[in-house]
Amino acid sequence: HAAQGDGEVSGVAAEVPTTGIITVDLIKGHATPTPRVISDDFLMSVGNARPMEDAARIAFFDLVTWLSTDYGFDRLAAYQLCSQVSQVRLANMVDILYSVVAKFPKRYMVRS
């Protein structure tokens, strides 16, 4: 998509032909329960489910787990911090499953 509003409400986004380059790191023996994305500013986990609340729970459960297992956060501290600083985006609400993206700002990943 060249552009898509939150939720892709009507099921239609702005489509354009394009070419691009993406980088994928394959980490053998390390499966993730949901799709994960790392950008310059955020760690993101995607939950897909119905109802929408379940999609959000899946995304945030994975995000908290990711922060605690891979980045050394105490699990309860990660949960509390996600409640305080994370963002949530509705990516899709027209397909069979809703897609919700839980976003954690990387600026809060300060190591001592």
Image (tube, grey):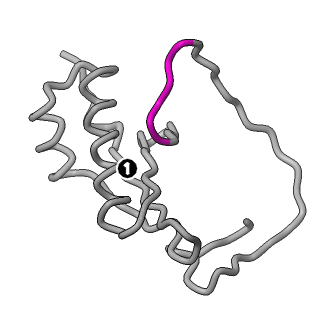
Q: Residue at x 28, y 32 (%)?
A: 65
Position of 30 relative to 107 (above/below): above
What's drawn in magenta, residue-wise?
Answer: 29-34
Q: Is residue 81 left or right of residue 58?
A: left
Instruction: For the C terminus, give its image quadrant.
Output: top left
Q: Which is the main secondary structure of the residues drawn in magenta?
A: loop
Residue 94, given in percent of the width and then of the height, sits at 56, 77
Quadrant position of residue 2: bottom right
Q: Is residue 22 left or right of residue 7?
A: right
Q: Residue at x 13, y 25 (%)?
A: 74
Q: In this view of the protein, which residue sits in the foreground, 4 or 76? A: 76
Q: Is residue 112 visible?
A: yes
Q: Is residue 86 magenta?
A: no
Residue 27, given in percent of the width and then of the height, sits at 58, 16
Q: In this view of the protein, which residue sits in the foreground, 105 or 99? A: 99
Disc 1 residue type (three-letter): Lys
Q: Residue at x 48, y 62 (%)?
A: 99
